[in-house]
Amino acid sequence: MGLKEHAAAIRERVARTAALAGRKPSDVLLVGVTKTRSVQEMQEVASLVDAIGENKVQEAQVKREAWGDHPTPPWRLIGHLQNNKARRAVELFDAVDSLDSIPLAERLDRIAGELSRRLSVLIEVNTAKEASKTGMAPEAFPALLDRVLTLPNLKLEGLMTIGPLTDDEVRVRQAFAELRGMAEDARGRCGLPLPVLSMGMSGDFEWGILEGSTMVRIGTALFGPREYKML
């Protein structure tokens, strides 16, 4: 199977799972996770996904410079962002999905203002409660939410999480359900729609959709096993 067939198969799984949840396939956006993938591979799937998800600022910069005038969907930063790379992230990406601290929020807001743009963001929460996972602790979320709402150059779209590293459906879905509940509470507090719930990757995106995900991040199921090599 080629990339087009892989993408079609993923779309079919999304549609089937969305139907089980009483939702439309169009309710779920597909982000192609392109870590370590070549620009050529990325351009092949550009028209097959709703967004490109990159993990690292430096890798994204190299790829952007090589992209040329090929049509592209939005680029979203889905990996952890260090404060010292915030400026390049604002310059390179259409959205930062891994906002996880007040200092980072304030830095992104300041830089976005300097660049005369409003940056879309998701707050990443570690609902898996695993030390190896990025994202803020759930109990720290209200303070970050309140601060982000005061920052004029950030547009909060919703929340993101990474499911626990397990095949236990109950545990994974509990982590996703917790994020959904946090989003519902946040909507009540701030009055914003917060339409994006980014939950689910290649191994668990169907569980994410059943728990309300509106954005799934797919790498291996789209491209095949990752090969770690120099770009």
Image (cartoon, grey):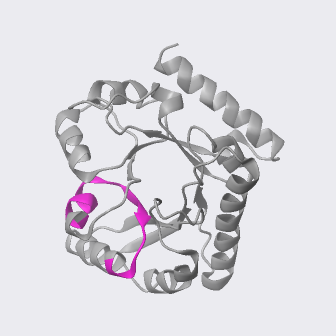
Q: Position of residue 67 (x, y in %)?
A: 23, 34
Q: Horizontally, is 113 left or right of 150 in the view?
A: left
Most distant residue in the top direction: 1
- Quadrant showing the C terminus: top left
- Of residues 35 and 158, the one nearer the viewer is 35
Report if residue 48 is visible in the image. Answer: no
What percent of the width, then of the height, locates residue 128?
Answer: 59, 62
Residue shown at the point (52%, 65%) measured from the top left: 157
**In this orientation, which residue lies closer to the viewer: 164 or 108?**
164
The question of residue 92 being in magenta is answered with yes
Q: Is residue 151 visible?
A: yes
Magenta span has 40?
no
Residue extent of the magenta highlight: 86-103
Which residue appears at 48% of the width and 72% of the height?
A: 136
Q: Is residue 10 above or below residue 189?
A: above
Side of 164 where 62 appears, left or right: left
Residue 35 vertical placement versus 45 (above, below)? below
Residue at (75% x, 42% y) in the render: 18
- The residue drawn where x is 54% and y is 22% is 6
- In the rendered image, residue 42, in percent from the top left (x then y), is placed at 35, 30
> Disc count in the image?
0
Q: Position of residue 60 (x, y in %)?
A: 26, 45
Query: Could you say which quadrant of the image residue 221 lies in?
Result: top right
| Residue situated in front as seen by the camera: 54 or 4 | 54
